[in-house]
Image: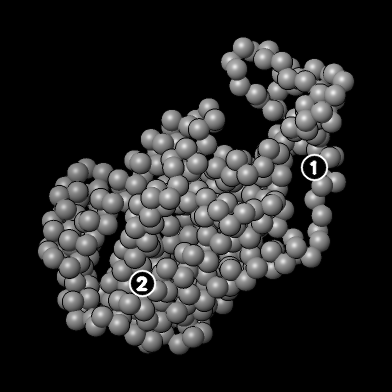
Amino acid sequence: MDQTFATWKVYLSIFIGLSIISFMVFRNIKEVHFIKSENQGTYCWVDSNLNKKIDFSNENEFVECVNGDYRKETFKDIINQINWDSKSIGWMFLAICCMFGRDIAYILRIRYLTNKDLTWKSAFNVILIWEFASAISPGVVGGVSVAMFILNKENITLGRSTAIVIITALLDNLFFLMMIPVVFLFVSPEVLFPMNSAIDKSILVVFWGGFTLILLICFILFIGIFIYPQVIGKILFFICKLPFFYRFSSKVSKLDLDIQITSSELRKEKASFWLKSIVSTFLSWSFRYLVINCILAAFLDISYVDHFFILGKQLVLWLFMHISPTPGGSGVAEYAFGELMSSFSKSMFLITGMAIIWRFISYFPYLVIGSILLPKWLKSKKAVNI
């Protein structure tokens, strides 16, 4: 387990994130863009590639002329347009508050799921170390791979820890699955996906493929927890017959027992238990999404309808991060942010800048806090005998 929290993973996460950010900045720092400015510009559009589409970042598509409909915008022009006034500072403050709100909702949820056996301090430690584990783990794995260890260190039995981790995974995924149909009722797919992107088809394939995978996982977890807990054990036993997974076969029996204990415990919970867990899950994810809304509103003129579109696009963004093979979605998150949010600004440099701010608010702090908190927390805890 110590290897899970190895220092090199922290540095790898930081390196990947900063490398992608640096690449995006240097790629866009020389960017030249053309802005619509009817009868006040100095450039006219010419369809140089004969595709009947305006490419605002292609200099070959524009020629100097008198009383043109377009004007050139450079990196310097974009920098001059960014004003840290009371509006932008206020929205950035709200973005930070949303991050605190997200963690508070997570702390409340873990307290509910443990029936308040965790103190506020213990719940605080669990959530921050859990977030740290997520930040250094591949997005497709997430912090759940070490969550049982963290809870076990806080004197929660292994079987109960298994129950809590499965519940959180199920609730988080169900939130995503329920929100997608709601969003598609009000927002067309053309708005959610960057259809002008060269990778638009692959984005659609990955999105619906990931959606199907998450739906399948939720179905298996639901059946395994509430209806037929033995089915997961049978699947695990079958998988461990394969050559690569054979070395894990000795642990399957214990895990199978934990899953059955999970099922027994959950069936005894009252409706209030589920209501509190669902509400705190909804709040945590809502605060998570609103961080980006606040950042975009700090630098762009965002309407009320745009805010709803941004929330919809974040469902796509979250899925890409969820299936990412990189630590904490590093690289994938920044790139997907630029692709999905490009419709709100014609300046990719400005979009890149907002992506950087987003990651510095929502990702890098957990690497720093976790690196400081984890060693002290590990020393203060003793292994629990199960």
What residue is pinned by disc 1? 78
At mark 2, the secondary structure is helix
Q: Earlier in the sequence, mark 1 or mark 2?
A: 1
Question: At x 44% / y 42%, what residue is drawn?
Answer: 188
Quarter of the image that includes the N terminus: bottom left
Residue 118, picture quadrant: bottom left
Q: Is residue 99 above or below residue 118?
A: above
Question: At x 48% / y 60%, what residue is drawn?
Answer: 134
What residue is pinned by disc 2? 278
Image location (x, y in percent) of residue 249: 20, 55
Question: At x 69% / y 63%, what residue is drawn?
Answer: 92
Image location (x, y in percent) of residue 270: 24, 83
At mark 1, the secondary structure is helix
Q: Is residue 114 above or below residue 294?
A: below
Q: Amino acid at mark 2?
A: Ile
Q: Is residue 280 above or below residue 367?
A: below
Image location (x, y in percent) of residue 209: 34, 40
Question: At x 77% / y 20%, what residue is drawn?
Answer: 44
Q: Amino acid at mark 1?
A: Ile
